[in-house]
Amino acid sequence: MDAVERTAVAANTVADAAAGDRSAFTELVATYHGDLLRLAMVITGDADLADDAAQAAWHHAWRKLRQLRDPSRVRPWLLSIAANEARQALRKRARSVPLPETWGDESGPSRDPIDAIDLERALATLRPDERRLIGLRYVSGFSAPELAEVLRLSPEGVRTRLKRIMDRLRVELSDDQS
């Protein structure tokens, strides 16, 4: 199901779920759980923590769904909850987080294992909040204006942060190549 279809499904089910309809909420979970789990995985680097964060996000969403103002924005809302839960899980664990061997959409083009290792090492140098920004932008597909809304920054501030992070990753990757 693509993003447009998911948005249409969400617009039709959010009100019902907010009113307490468990089957409507189950439909939201079926539609968005993979997105929440992938984002939490990028942020935490740990499958168990990612699963815990996604579950905590769903619990939070069930309690707060009535507060969602725009049902068509349910996906960004859910992903921001998952990102926050993932960061909290990392803080609770209070340890450095290695990135997993595989992450993201495995149906995409195959990667050279050496490049994947280099990218994982480079990403591991980022702070959790930086991995969150990278995950929201490049894994979850948020635009700069959407990220600005979630992070309470200006779109230009988001673009500047992303540029700085990407510049650091490029330097890290070029150092790995030497």
Image (cartoon, grey):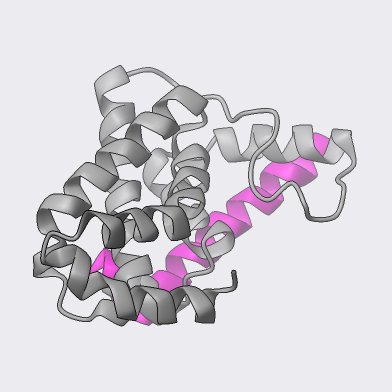
| Secondary structure character of the magenta stretch overall | helix
Q: Is residue 103 magenta?
A: no
What residue is drawn where x is 66% and y is 32%? 121
Q: Which of the image's four quarters has the N terminus?
A: bottom right
What residue is drawn where x is 52% and y is 81%? 4
Q: In this view, does 177 lie above or below 143?
A: above
Q: Give the image quarter of residue 176.
A: top right
From the top left corner, tell me how far across and down residue 140 is, in percent.
51, 61
What residue is drawn where x is 42% and y is 39%? 127
* Near-viewer residue (164 or 75): 75
Residue 115 visible within the image: yes
From the top left corner, tell me how far across and down residue 59 is, in percent.
21, 43
Q: In this view, does 129 lie above or below 19?
A: above
Q: In this view, does 103 lie above or below 91?
A: below
* Figure label count: 0
From the top left corner, tell me how far across and down residue 156 is, in percent.
39, 80
Residue 157 visible within the image: no
Q: In this view, does 145 lie to the left or right of 15?
A: right
Q: In this view, does 98 lie to the left or right of 114?
A: left
What residue is drawn where x is 27% and y is 46%? 58
Q: Is residue 173 magenta?
A: yes
- Provide the residue span drawn in magenta: 150-178
Q: In this view, does 64 lie to the left or right of 84?
A: left
Q: In this view, does 16 lie above or below 123?
A: below
Q: Which of the image's four quarters has the C terminus?
A: top right
From the top left corner, tell me how far across and down residue 155 is, in percent.
37, 80
